[in-house]
């Protein structure tokens, strides 16, 4: 190579280095700022040259960058639904997968774990259906003859009627057949609250000591928050479910409850209620709702409130109103 050519290349390199060293070369360009405004998350410390490859990687389908594989964090919007609760101490959660957004009323209570009570029949039914412990067409269990406070329980009863009547003795038998090991494994997979089954027989329950009517899910060791209830229902019925279509359809059939003013809204759920020394301390209605366009997941929880109707029927009434208003895109004030 000629000396003049070498000298020319050396000069060019020196010029490029000096330009890159000037202030402002590593600052954000208008283009990068626009990308960040559109939602591309980048560290404030990153230079323009570091940001550009990241944008390409996260936007390229073939990329194996771990950032792309992480779940996008759901947005949480706090809303005021107090007028639905009529001064009852309560919380409500709606999760809309299409928007990847939670709407939450009374977030502190929505994140507080309480006993699931009879909403747990969704879970015991799910496990029993999936593992052949309940076969809906051959599911009648024989009544022991013991007289219970609920007349609907004082008879031989099948799965569908037991679910709708919330028959505790029926599901006590089902849960004992599921057994501790399978139950613990399934709760761990579902990330069901604290997954606590240590009080298997429900000896901590202060309201009832009949072994046919107690268990870890009734004011005992198992606890879950309203937000976690919604997350569990989505794990069962959402796009990434691990449960068979047959099981989900059988469970949907018994969960169907549609008392919406809109005929195209189908609401599926289960109530639950628990007492402490005879006083109602927990009431629930949790499940999901379908329209031809979308599915949402919901939970309404009511806690102990003096001189107020803290019942599972009231929780269901509030949930139906909130869900219907949300799906009709009408203001929920």
Image (spheres, rainbow, N blue to C red):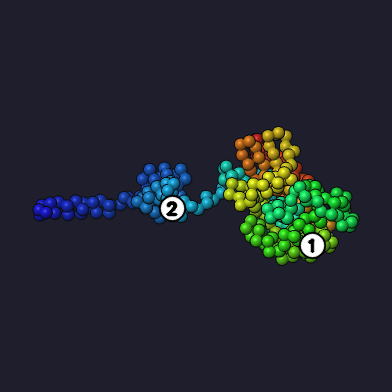
**Horizontal and vertical percent for residue 255?**
72, 45
Quarter of the image that includes the N terminus: bottom left
Q: Nearer the viewer, residue 209 or 309?
A: 209
Identify the residue at image location x=70%, y=46%.
Answer: 250
Q: Is residue 327 above or below residue 75?
A: above
| Label 1 residue SS | loop
The residue drawn where x is 82% and y is 62% is 211
Q: Residue at x 68, y 53 (%)?
A: 130
- Return the x and y of residue 241 as percentages of the image width and height: 61, 50
Q: For label 2, count other residues whose C-alpha is less than 10 Å away and answer few (under 14), some (14-19) or many (20+).
A: few
Foreground: 56 or 245? Answer: 245
Frontmost residue, 11 versus 167: 167
The x, y position of residue 198, in whole percent, is 72, 66
Specify whether residue 39 is in view.
yes
Asked whether the viewer can see residue 276, the reply is: no
Mark sitting earlier along the chain (1/2): 2
Q: Residues within 10 Å of mark 1 (few under 14, many from 20)?
A: many
Would you say the residues marked 1 and 2 are in contact, meaning their CB atoms lie under 8 Å apart?
no
Q: Secondary structure at mark 2?
A: loop
CA distance separating discs 1 and 2: 51 Å
Q: Which mark is residue 95?
A: none
Q: Is residue 236 left or right of residue 31?
A: right
Number of numbered discs overlaid on the protein picture: 2
- Residue at position x 42%, y 46% in the image: 60
Which quarter of the figure is the C terminus placed in? top right
Name the residue nearer the viewer: 32 or 167: 167
Judging by the rendered image, the residue that carries numbered circle 1 is: 205
Residue 274 is situated, as x and y percent measured from the top left of the image, at 78, 55
- Name the residue tied to disc 2: 64
- Of badges 1 and 2, the one in the foreground is 2
């Amino acid at each position: 190579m000629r000396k003049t050519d070498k000298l020319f290349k050396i000069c060019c390199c020196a010029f490029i280095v000096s330009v890159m060293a000037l202030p402002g070369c590593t600052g954000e360009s208008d283009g990068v700022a626009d990308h960040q405004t559109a939602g591309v998350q980048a560290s404030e410390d990153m230079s323009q040259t570091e940001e550009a490859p990241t944008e390409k990687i996260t936007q390229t389908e073939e990329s194996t960058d771990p950032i792309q594989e992480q779940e996008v964090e759901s947005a949480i919007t706090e809303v005021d639904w107090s007028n639905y609760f009529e001064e009852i101490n309560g919380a409500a959660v709606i999760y809309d997968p299409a928007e990847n957004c939670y709407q939450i009323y009374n977030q502190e209570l929505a994140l507080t774990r309480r006993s699931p009570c009879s909403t747990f029949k969704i879970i015991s039914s799910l496990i029993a259906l999936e593992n052949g412990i309940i076969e809906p067409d051959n599911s009648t269990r024989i009544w022991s003859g013991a007289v219970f406070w609920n007349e609907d329980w004082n008879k031989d009863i099948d799965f569908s009627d037991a679910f709708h009547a919330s028959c505790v003795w029926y599901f006590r038998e089902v849960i004992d057949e599921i057994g501790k090991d399978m139950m613990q494994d399934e709760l761990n997979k579902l990330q069901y609250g604290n997954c606590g089954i240590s009080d298997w027989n429900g000896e901590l329950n202060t309201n009832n000591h009949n072994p046919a009517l107690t268990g870890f899910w009734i004011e005992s060791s198992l606890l879950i928050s309203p937000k976690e209830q919604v997350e569990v229902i989505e794990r069962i019925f959402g796009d990434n479910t691990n449960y068979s279509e047959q099981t989900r359809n059988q469970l949907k059939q018994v969960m169907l409850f549609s008392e919406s003013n809109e005929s195209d809204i189908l609401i599926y759920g289960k109530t639950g209620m628990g007492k402490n020394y005879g006083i109602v301390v927990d009431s629930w209605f949790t499940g999901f709702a379908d329209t031809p366009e979308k599915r949402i997941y919901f939970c309404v929880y009511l806690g102990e409130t003096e001189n107020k109707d803290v019942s599972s029927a009231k929780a269901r009434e509030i949930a139906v109103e909130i869900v219907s208003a949300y799906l009709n895109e009408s203001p929920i004030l």
